[in-house]
Image: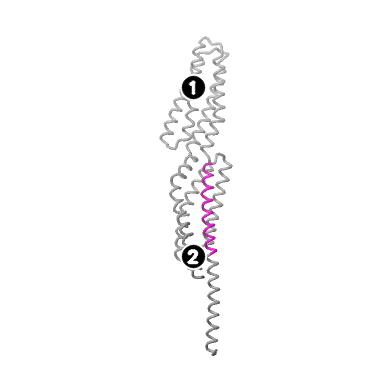
Amino acid sequence: MSMTRVLAAVLIAATAAGCGGDTNAAFKELSDARNAAGDLQVAFIKATDAANRAVMAQADAASVAYASEANAEKQDVRRGIDRIRPLLDALHYDEEARILREFESRFAAYDKLDRQILDLAVENSNLTAQRLSFDAGQSAADAFRDALQTLAAGHAADAWRVKATTAAALAAVREIQVMQAPHIADLDDASMTRIEARMAAAEKIARDALASLPALVDTRTRPAVETATASLNRFVEVNARIVALSRRNTNVRSIALSLDQKQQVIPPCRQSLQALREALDRRGHRQGRWGA
């Protein structure tokens, strides 16, 4: 073999070895990019799932825990983006890099809305109002009932009038209690205003009834009227707190946003991630054929 042919053979072998090294490096970078894309997809799914659980949680501690989990998963999404971007740049995958930028933009819109929803969910104003209605509200209403029963059992000249008056007062308070649940669940301001007007009318009936009682009972029973009035005042105070919390509507608003606006930003994010996975898979198939 001539020296020229020997040098040519050595050059070809060296070039082939060099290409083989480049090919192996490209295969590794592609494999890393595909794994990163898969991890990115999983992190986003976990983030949306944790956010949904935060919205639907029935306890303050659970809402906070799930919201924290959602934020942690979103941080994993951001780390995933930072991990895959340089791999795509090194491979000169312009189309995949474009899809990743598209996902980043869509994820930013998702994250902005998600932060709003999670802030509302952890405040739990509707659930707090509901617990207040079932606990302190019920206790105050029962104390009012007990005071009225003492009045009705007293020895009054107009016993039947006392019983009718106390029954009307108690019915008015019970009506307010019944209206608390729809107020807590309502999202419409005008509807809540109408409920509050009905509550105010019922409160007036109860107060007017109490105001008429001193003239109907004897001196010994009149302190029970003061006790009933104090109980009514406590109930009205608790009801005002319930209404204020209900007006904030954080649970109802977070659920509404999750079922409406959020469902408009999640699918585009998933589509971008799926498109990225599929594009990288096609690259792998082509490299596999070339390697063969």
Which amino acid does the dot numbered 2 rest on?
His
Label 1: few (<14), some (14–19) or many (≥20) C-alpha neighbours in 10 Å: some
Q: Which of marks 1 and 2 precedes in the sequence?
A: 1
**Most foreground residue, 177 or 39:** 39
List x then y, in percent, for residue 98: 44, 62
List x then y, in percent, for residue 271: 45, 55
List x then y, in percent, for residue 60: 57, 41
200 left or right of 226 in image: left
Which amino acid does the dot numbered 1 rest on?
Ala
The vertical placement of 15 against 190, above or below, is below
The vertical placement of 111 against 291, above or below, is above
Q: Which residue is mark 1?
A: 171
Instruction: Give the residues drawn in magenta, as a range.
Output: 31-56
User: SS of the residue at dot 2?
Assistant: helix
Could you tell me which residue is drawn at 56 percent across and 46 percent down? 66
**Most foreground residue, 43 or 161:** 43
76 left or right of 103 in image: right
Q: Which residue is mark 2?
A: 285
